[in-house]
Amino acid sequence: MGLRAQAVVSGLSLAVGAALGAGLSGWRPRGEPGAVWVQAAAELSVPAGVTRFGLPGLSQLKSRESHVLSYEPRLRGPAWVLELLTGERIHGEADRQSSDFQEDESVHPYHRAQNTDYRGSGYDRGHLAAAANHRLSQKAMDETFLLSNVYPQNPHLNRKAWNKLEKHCRKLTKSNRNVYVCTGPLFLPRTEPDGKTYVKYEVIGKNNVAVPTHFFKVVVLEKFGGELELRPYVMPNAPVDENIPLERFLVPIESIERAAGLLFVPNLVKSTNRLQAITAGGK
């Protein structure tokens, strides 16, 4: 792992740590700073003989040069993507025009999205780790174009309100020491005319790539004085008026934790006793 990647993972652990990996056996630094460790199946305490033929699956934690993600094979996309933004990281010589969307060959072919899945679907290939957040090197930007960092996203949302939120996150690097961003899909329930509540979502392409009903972006600001500020956003995967203030999309963090099956607050509380959560109507 390169020095830049080490720094990314080490910094990211401040904001979320192991709790983000709800399905992980473990994720903690070991050895030199920033190393990522996922507990091997052989180290698990399991009944004798059960794992004779191995385990059918483990959470797929993928460490890139400047972001980390947990891949969800069933959805053909990430459960969450984690970034550390600083003024240095968002500026550089990387050229978006030199990057192309590519399938992630580190994912098993059964569970992998392909570019052909998006053709004629009516959806954009929406980045979760935004390409413009990773200008520091061409490799860092190229890795954001792997389809393991992408979900089908409404074109109007992708190019308007969601893009506005991504730009806002970059702007926050000017007034904060570090900006931690965790982005992921949501599949929210809805009550149908029959009175029952269902979780329904579209899939596209021959690989049945899931189309999220909503997206979340949890932003943790590390102030120059050491305080942490939490800003949790949710937007529907539908056209959104870009003139609506971003503050209108702030939600209680527990609503994201419950819906996504993740935990943010416990690790933040461990890191500081100066945590401020900003929700709709907050200051």
Image (cartoon, rainbow, N blue to C red):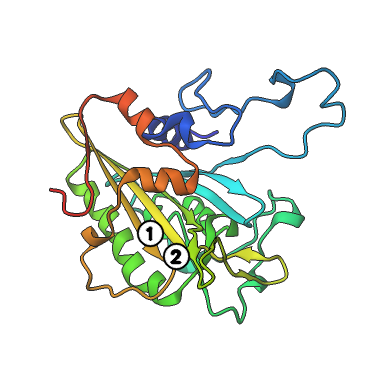
Q: Nearer the viewer, mark 2 or mark 1?
A: 1
Q: Position of residue 255 (x, y in %)?
A: 38, 48
Q: Position of residue 46 (x, y in %)?
A: 74, 20
Element at label 1: helix
Q: Amino acid at mark 1?
A: Ala
Q: Nearer the viewer, residue 248 or 162?
A: 248
N-terminal label among 2 and 1: 2
Is residue 102 visible in the rendered image? The answer is yes
Q: Position of residue 97 (x, y in %)?
A: 47, 69
| Location of residue 106 with respect to 116 vertically, above or below | above
Quadrant assignment for the N terminus: top right
Q: Amino acid at mark 2?
A: Arg
Which residue is at 48% across, 29% downward? Answer: 18
What residue would you read off at disc 1? Answer: 132
| Location of residue 139 with respect to 26 vertically, above or below | below
83 relative to 172 in the view: left or right = right
196 relative to 53 in the view: left or right = left
